[in-house]
Structure formats: C-alpha cells, structure tokens
Amino acid sequence: MVLPKAGAFLWTTLHGRILTGERLKLIRIARPNVCLLCKENEETVEHLLFWCSYTKKVWDWLLNNLQYESVRSQSLKGFLLAWPACYKKSKWSILWVVSSAMLVWHIWKERNRRVFNEEALSLDLLIPKIKTTIGEVINVKVVGRKYCAYSSWDKEMERLWNLTKISSYKFADKKQNRASTVWIPPIAGSLKVNFDGASCDNLGKSGYGTIIRDEFGNFVGANFGPLGITSNNMA
Ligand SMILES: [Zn+2]
C-alpha cells in the first residue's frame, strides 16, 4: 500500500523517528554517520530528505514540474506546509501532498538500498520511478473530489503528470488498485493502531511498522523494527 506507507513515513519523519545515522548514533549502534547519497555530509533527517545535493536535485525536478517556485525554508516541515494557499482548497493540494510524500519515501528507499543492498540508483533512474508512483496514486486520490475552477495551470499539470481528464475520472477497481485504501478514524475517545510488514524480495530482509493515531487522525506514536529473513506473507 504505497500511499498509506508513504504517508505514515512522512509523519514518522516529521517527528524525527526514522533511523538515520544521527539517530543510530544516539542509540549507540555503530555505523559511520555519513550520508550515503552525497557521501559528504553527516546524515541527519533534514539533510537526507531536504538539503542533500542528491535530494535537492529531486526536489528541484518536482518543483519545476509543479511550476512552483518555493523559497527553501529553515525546515522540511516548514517547506511542506508552505504550499500556496490559493491551491489549498483545490484538488491540486492533493498533488502536493502525494508528490512530496512520494519523493520523501523514495529518497528513504534509495538510502536503504545503499545501506542494505549496496546498490545505488542514479537520478535518471530514480526520478522516473517517483513520477510513475505519483501518477498512479494521484489518479486514484482525486477520484470523486469536488472540483471548482479550471485554469491553464490545471491543464498543464494534467499534461505533465499524465493525469486523466477530469471528466473521465473513474472509480478505481479496489481489487486492482490497493492505493485506494482510506484511513477511517476510530470511535471518539479511542486510538487506532495500524501496522504492516514487508520483505525485500520474497524471502529476504523484512521489517514491520506500526502507527497509532487518535480519533482526529493526530499522530500519537509509531514503532518499527526488523523481522529478520522471512517471506512477504509472514511479514
Ligand atoms: Zn547527502
């Protein structure tokens, strides 16, 4: 489930709970604290997902394709929240949320690819992957949304992101497209725990992740860890 995973990851990230070199050092797991994307700087969350020269090129690609000129703020969170207010009420706010979550998620996966598989993807290979995922998810997410003004920017975004025409959006087949999953809040006064596991190759290094949210969808806590070598189904 790409979107819920990427969304949960972004939440975890913004709360500083992902295991970067910086955090591993805090909990005393020895690993050289060097960013594997640029091999120049210390690996902190902000560096890895925002300031790194490799990551920066991906952000530049995204902003360019959104025709969005943004001043880099002091933090990733500030930058993510700075999407222009005039777009906030339109369905295109979903494009920003989805595309930024996917970008961050793919950068994290690339970092893990380098840590665990000792393989590296160049930007030429990573960017098309991100673009495909965004296109897949956004086409599902905008289904059925109320839609107001239609500008040349909307038209351009449809072309750039290969989105279907507004009038022809169709409800995705749930069996075909798992990304159509929607998070439903728990009843008032209670918490909801969502969890999932995955393995890298079917019978490979595996892990799990858990996220707890309240009735308003507010983040309460998260946890994740390794499951050793197991199958997709077991994870
Ligand atoms: Zn770096």
Image (cartoon, rainbow, N blue to C red):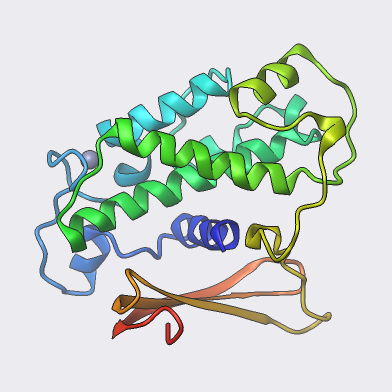
- Depth check: 120 or 73 in front? 120
Residue 104, image x, y percentages = 44, 47
On-image quarter of the C terminus: bottom left
Going by the image, does 34 lie left or right of 180? left
Above/below status of 48 relative to 177: above
Determine the image quadrant of residue 168: top right
Quarter holding the N terminus is bottom right
What residue is rendered at 13% in x and 38% in y? 40
Instruction: Please state the horizontal and vertical placement of residue 94, each as a whole percent of the image.
Output: 69, 41
Point 73% across, 32% down: residue: 164
Could you tell me which residue is drawn at 76 percent across and 67 percent down? 216
Left or right, residue 56 beside residue 196: left
Residue sticking out furthest to the bottom: 234
> Does 113 appear above or below 163?
below
Dividing the picture into quarters, in which one does residue 200 lie? bottom left
Residue at 25% from the left image edge and 36% from the top image edge: 122
Count of marks overlaid on the render: 0
Residue 205 percent across, percent down from the top left: 27, 75
Asked whether residue 10 is in view, the answer is yes
Relative vertical location of residue 43 with respect to residue 56 in this rendering, above or below:
below
Q: Position of residue 69 (x, y in %)?
A: 54, 17
Q: Quadrant of ligand 1?
A: top left
Q: Is residue 75 visible?
A: no
Q: Nearer the viewer, residue 125 or 114?
A: 125
Does 168 sit left or right of 235 as displayed?
Answer: right
